[in-house]
Image (spheres, coloured by chain):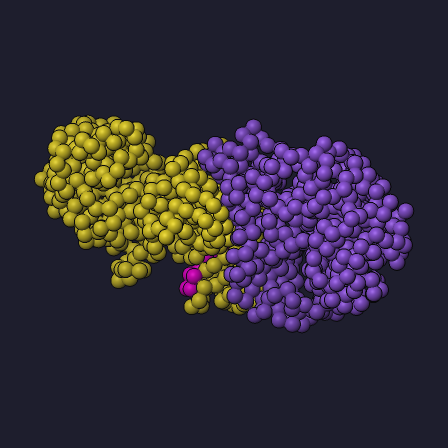
Chain colours: A yellow, B purple
Amino acid sequence: MNIIALILAGGTGTRLWPLSRKNTPKQLLALTGNRTLIQETCRRLWTVVTPDKQWIITSKELYDSVKHHIRLLREEFHQDKSEEEYITVMQEPIGKNTAPAIFWAAQRCRHIYGEDSILLVMPSDHLIVGENEFIDTLKAGIEKAKEGFLVTYGIKPSHPETGYGYIKIENNKIKSKTPYKVLNFVEKPNYERAQKYIEEGNYLWNSGMFAFHVGTLIKEGLNLCPNISKPFNESDPFNSSQINNSYMKAEANSIDYAVMEKTDKALVIPASFGWNDVGTWKSFFDISDKDENGNVITGNHINIDTKNSFVYGQERLIATVGIEDMTVIDTPDALMICPLDQTQRVKEIVEKLKIENSKTHIEHKTVKRPWGKYTVMEEGLGYKIKKIVVEPGEKLSMQMHYHRSEHWIVVRGSAKITNGDKEIIIHENQSTYIPKATVHRLENPGSMSLEIIEVQCGLYLEEDDIVRFDDVYGRRSS
Amino acid sequence: MNIIALILAGGTGTRLWPLSRKNTPKQLLALTGNRTLIQETCRRLWTVVTPDKQWIITSKELYDSVKHHIRLLREEFHQDKSEEEYITVMQEPIGKNTAPAIFWAAQRCRHIYGEDSILLVMPSDHLIVGENEFIDTLKAGIEKAKEGFLVTYGIKPSHPETGYGYIKIENNKIKSKTPYKVLNFVEKPNYERAQKYIEEGNYLWNSGMFAFHVGTLIKEGLNLCPNISKPFNESDPFNSSQINNSYMKAEANSIDYAVMEKTDKALVIPASFGWNDVGTWKSFFDISDKDENGNVITGNHINIDTKNSFVYGQERLIATVGIEDMTVIDTPDALMICPLDQTQRVKEIVEKLKIENSKTHIEHKTVKRPWGKYTVMEEGLGYKIKKIVVEPGEKLSMQMHYHRSEHWIVVRGSAKITNGDKEIIIHENQSTYIPKATVHRLENPGSMSLEIIEVQCGLYLEEDDIVRFDDVYGRRSS
């Protein structure tokens, strides 16, 4: 029976602000090493689901970034595979919670692999420790899905967590990897109630991971939530205008509410691998290695008598004196300071930023692009200064701006530059000037990174003043 | 009788790090408005001492900056006076505490005004509230100095402060502006002892301000500390090589230890104006106006449930959640976080930075110059990017670099540029290139600020690669 993985990557990260931004949510952060959480989610599943059967579903805003992260994963592990043979990135026309995404994917499964196939559903932004146990647990659920069940995975709770929903079962001597009937799903509890759940022993954390028998899921969907599943049942899941239409009609809901809480086909598989949804800075601190003072420190830090604190910095120097149980998250354009036990309140900051129409919750100062990255170093009236890094062999799109001229100075490497009808190569300590309304392209023909300083001059300097003629990365937006 | 003010401005600020740096100590910060503490110190004295009788004494390192601040003061208040008729800046060849500086100044007084003159001595970096009371208090001391006494000013203590030294007198019903005999000077006490001083009522804070009868000071100096005063007695106070020599011979000591604690000519004038030495961030917080949550906030701040805290920021966004009694001081290249009651420990950070050979305690990212300022935006291998702002009518020195080329792009205003034997004027969105070993000069001929982006390329990019041919500000160092 075919197994397909649907990786949910539409989340807009606000809870790890200021490191996460709308354009760089949690799944696109490399919190624990060189790979981002979404890359790790894909990689971890390969022993069960090959890359060609992994589908990521994300939003229009994140689509280009997700594609980029997947391209890097392919370059790292599967240079032999073409983009077409690799992980598919599906773009939702609108975010309507998990149920519409899952019913769309289920229809795609049915069309390609038939109703007797398994749809594994997985968040893209969780941390998993103990990958063998993870795989064995997944497989135990897949076995029950093959029998026609709708399987959810529940994590054995280690402490009375108030940040998660719970799944209640009858038995209180829970065995890992063993299927149980779901009694009911329970909302995030308060602390007393969470303690009670732990004592009673028949509650699991709701992980948001599922293994569905596709035929059963579609049938149950039509019975239990036809206003979500029917629009997808009636359209061609590969026709984007039909899918747009289905999304318009479908009610926004989670698969838990729409199906799992109502169906009698639900089973839960208890899991005992290490799991963390990195929902707050505190939860990330809890699973990180501490130094001898109980601190987790990243970056350029001077420590005077600082204890049990989480200091995340980058280039700027951070000095902390006599603080305890504190979170300090520093990025080039924003700094957040909060006691560790209040990091769930970071969302209040983001709410305020939205109201104030600040960009600081949307994007970072350094913006990643498929060809490299750029950093806005300064903006003033009539000018903007960027540092642009182009990776070896990469090129920006052939483009033109109506409202700005650009001065380029190479400070590292060599640049191949198309400037109107001329093509030149310039090196370190050389510069060129792109007048406005001139078609141009920047390319790194070398084998080391190209770094240029760009000084834009003009009265309108936003990213949307770009006319794109040709782009090797097939980008539709900027 | 002539009154001369000696303003001590050699202090190297570490206690208000990261806002104060070695090159920008406390006296050069504008903590309470648009003027720096040293400018305020000069201005406040004008009703007693005219600018031509004000002498500032500072170090070689701070000399150019102090001159610049005094020039701005003259432009603000005394455009009719020439530099020669204005506040004198004396440069110490080496810092040896207050006594040598005061004996040098005393000899200058004696040579110009005779022994029957008054030398007022004043720190440059204190905050004073209640200027009329301040002036009246000064005058009361000056009257006694005219009679031949060595007067110190003691602040009536408002609380048991452990950060100040105390002056003990006999009487415990202290009247302001009334001279008392000094019983003795007391070192910074611990808290219990400080409480006792307050209860006993015959102790004053040692403010570091004095009014000396010059003849008496010199005579007492020769009696009580000849190893400090004699080298100055024997040299021409206007001959810099003789003064260098005197400094080499003189013992380093404070005027309190060297003279005031030993002489029977000492009087103290109690003062009841508001006084603060801004010795810590806490002391600055204490005298600042608070908002309704007890906070003192500067900069771009998002406040979620923050109380009794001191947040000082600039352009970067700072979000604080649920913190209390905390100090957060943010500058472009360094951030400091510390509970308010521990801000005296900031010096521990600076000690660590010295050991680590970090530049972060020495200078700011934005460096002020007589012609404007520059900000190092980024440094990389082989390049450095600066934003340079030249004020209207100002010009940099005619100069040359052996090891770097410079690309200049005007982003605001117009620049007159000497580049080898050519002179050009370029405007916004125009650029030029200064090859290495080419004599050049940058000037703002316009009436608005000139802003240019400079990209330096070369293998050695330090400030000391400069050969200066002509400088309108008469600078001897860079």
Residue occupying the point 60% across, 37% down: B196
Residue B324: in magenta span: no
Q: Where is residue B444 in the image (x, y as percent from the top left)?
A: 74, 55
Question: As rendered, which of B272 and A123 lies closer to the eye?
Answer: B272
Residue A478 in view of the camera = no
Dividing the picture into quadrants, the one containing residue A170 is top left
Q: How many labels does the image show?
A: 0
Q: Position of residue B118 (x, y in %)?
A: 85, 48
Question: As rendered, which of B235 and A226 lies closer to the eye?
Answer: B235
Q: Which residue lies furthest to the left in this view?
A: A147
Residue B432 in view of the camera = yes
Residue occupying the point 68% across, 49% down: B28
In the rendered view, does B200 fall on the left or right side of B265?
A: left
Question: As rendered, which of A439 and A59 lies closer to the eye?
Answer: A59
Residue occupying the point 88% across, 58% down: B111
Q: Position of residue A403 (x, y in %)?
A: 58, 48
Assign the magenta stretch its main secondary structure: loop
Residue occupying the point 65% across, 46% down: B186
Q: From which residue to which does the magenta span run?
A: A391-399
Dividing the picture into quadrants, the one containing residue B167 is top right
